[in-house]
Image (spheres, grey):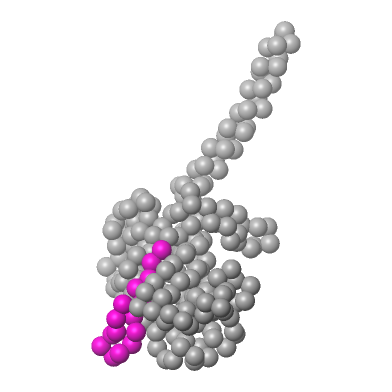
């Protein structure tokens, strides 16, 4: 067999496994082989403004912003902080957040009003807060500001405070990859409280979303 033909055949034999492995990875990437519950990690960048008071004189902030898939998850489990605009996969819109207590309390509690926190995905899936489990969180003032955050700017009164919390989600549009699913969202990040302008709020949070298909969708509030 001529050498040039041998080289062509060898190249084909090398290429076939690569194509096969790539196809399998692509298949996994789009979730066809995903085992429920499905887990997502998204990095949300949010902005908000004071937008009114509840009937019990609790302040309401309207918050929203994009959620990005992290470009890297390191071998030790750390999630990259880098934001790649091309990896935007969700949008948080019109989230109505209420705070209870005083801004200087050691732990400041906040709640997303039922149904107001909505995550929209490009394929049409819409995840809405609550599903019978309130989306609640806490800002931990007594831990002090996150001084190594790039948002930390005491000269401008901006104090990043650690936040944490969880709550229920349900898919309400009946579309996309997550159609009809139910699950939870847990967030772990910072809110940038502006001491010079209390009506303004920004923040970031790496959120874990976990979803599955309910046995009885009618039982989900």
Q: Nearer the viewer, residue 148 or 20?
A: 148
Is any atom of residue 35 visible in this view?
Answer: no
Q: Is residue 202 magenta?
A: no
Q: Residue furthest right?
A: 3
Q: Position of residue 214 (x, y in %)?
A: 36, 64
Q: Nearer the viewer, residue 120 or 97?
A: 97
Residue 169's place in the image compared with 85, above or below, is: below
Task: Give the quarter of the image for residue 149.
Answer: bottom right
Residue 199's place in the image compared with 125, above or below, is: below
Q: Position of residue 122 (x, y in %)?
A: 37, 51
Residue bounds of the magenta highlight? 51-65
Is any atom of residue 122 visible in this view?
Answer: yes
Query: How many labels, in total?
Result: 0
- What residue lies at 51% left-to-right and 68% top-to-bottom? 205
- What residue lies at 49% left-to-right and 61% top-to-bottom? 42
Q: Is residue 53 magenta?
A: yes
Which image quarter holds the C terminus?
A: bottom left
Q: Position of residue 139 (x, y in %)?
A: 50, 82
Q: Position of residue 100 (x, y in %)?
A: 40, 88
Chief secondary structure of the magenta portion: strand
- What residue lies at 55% left-to-right and 70% top-to-bottom? 151
């Amino acid at each position: 067999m001529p050498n040039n033909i041998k080289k062509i055949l060898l190249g084909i034999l090398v290429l076939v496994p690569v194509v096969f492995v790539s196809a399998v990875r692509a298949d996994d990437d789009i979730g066809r082989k995903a085992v429920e519950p499905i887990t997502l990690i998204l990095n949300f960048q949010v902005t908000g403004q004071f937008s009114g008071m509840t009937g019990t004189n609790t302040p309401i902030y309207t918050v929203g912003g994009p959620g990005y898939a992290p470009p890297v998850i390191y071998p030790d489990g750390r999630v990259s902080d880098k934001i790649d605009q091309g990896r935007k996969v969700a949008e948080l819109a019109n989230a109505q957040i209420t705070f209870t207590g005083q801004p200087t309390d050691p732990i400041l509690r906040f709640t997303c009003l039922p149904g107001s926190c909505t995550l929209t995905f490009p394929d049409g899936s819409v995840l809405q807060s609550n599903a019978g489990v309130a989306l609640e969180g806490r800002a931990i003032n007594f831990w002090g500001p996150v001084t190594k955050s790039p948002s930390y700017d005491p000269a401008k009164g901006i104090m990043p405070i650690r936040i944490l919390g969880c709550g229920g989600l349900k898919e309400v549009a009946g579309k996309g990859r997550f159609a009809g699913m139910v699950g939870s969202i847990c967030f772990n990040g910072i809110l940038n409280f502006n001491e010079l302008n209390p009506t303004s709020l920004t923040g970031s949070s790496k959120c874990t979303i976990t979803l599955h298909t309910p046995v009885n969708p009618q039982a989900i509030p």
